[in-house]
Amino acid sequence: GENVEQHPSTLSVQEGDSAVIKCTYSDSASNYFPWYKQELGKRPQLIIDIRSNVGEKKDQRIAVTLNKTAKHFSLHITETQPEDSAVYFCASSSYNTDKLIFGTGTRLQVFP
Amino acid sequence: DTAVSQTPKYLVTQMGNDKSIKCEQNLGHDTMYWYKQDSKKFLKIMFSYNNKELIINETVPNRFSPKSPDKAHLNLHINSLELGDSAVYFCASSPGLARAGLEQYFGPGTRLTVT
């Protein structure tokens, strides 16, 4: 069935450094790849998304890249700040299913 | 002016009891979802409804019964609660079906603890 693998499960960086989280999907029909951020005790919230007809998208300090051939997509956060500390989830959906499949999450800790 | 709201926020109950969680969205969305987030933070779809019709039932035990009285509300009733049901349950909504690649808006979650 559909599956999204996410790595690493935890990531610790120094404030100002970059952080990269990687995901791999299995369904070749996948065409939508959102990233959600969940702060401690809060709800998941969309931070950026990318569609299969685009290779890269950037929004200020965050960017997402997609490699359809390898079925990989990644989240890049530059100049990390303590408020970036949260659990990040990648996800994917396809044009022939009606569910969003989430990765297992990455706990990012940014140390001042 | 909360977009997606859930009640209650916390629910502590004993094994064998029956409980309900309510969800409402004021975004005018057509599609609503229930997700379960376990202690390891895995987010898993349970159900989705589109305009009050069941779209996804992700092999959830039939002790769980969703009900959508109208497209703004999706409730979750759980019978004969078990220890393994302890989790945070999130309601979410989106303008249309997941296949359209649309943002999902999550509610604040309901932390269910079964003792």
Image: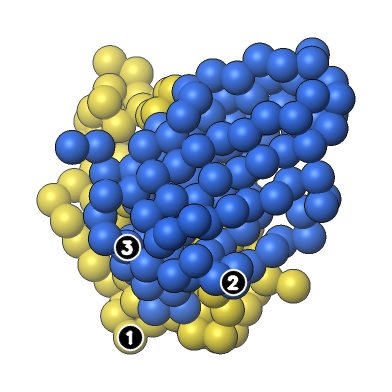
Q: Quadrant of residue A63?
A: bottom left
Q: Residue furthest left?
A: A60
Q: Amino acid at mark 2?
A: Ile
Q: Nearer the viewer, residue B79 or A110?
A: B79
Residue where numbered disc 1 is placed: A53
Q: Are marks 2 and 1 on the same chain?
A: no
Q: Is residue A18 left or right of residue B92?
A: left
Residue occupying the point 37% across, 37% down:
B5
Mark 3 = which residue? B29
Vertical side of A63 occupied by A78: above or below:
above
Q: Chain of mark 2?
A: B
Q: Secondary structure at mark 3?
A: loop
Asked which secondary structure carries label 1, the reply is loop
Q: Which amino acid is tagged 3? A: His
CB under 8 Å between discs 2 and 3: no
Callout 2: SS: strand
Q: Amino acid at mark 1?
A: Asn
Residue that badge 2 annotates: B55
| Chain A pictured colour | yellow
Q: Nearer the viewer, residue A45 or B25?
A: B25
Q: Is residue B54 above or below residue B106?
A: below
For the residues labelled 2 and 1, the Cα–Cα distance comes to 27 Å
Q: CA distance from mark 3 to mark 1?
A: 26 Å
Q: Quadrant of residue A51?
A: bottom left
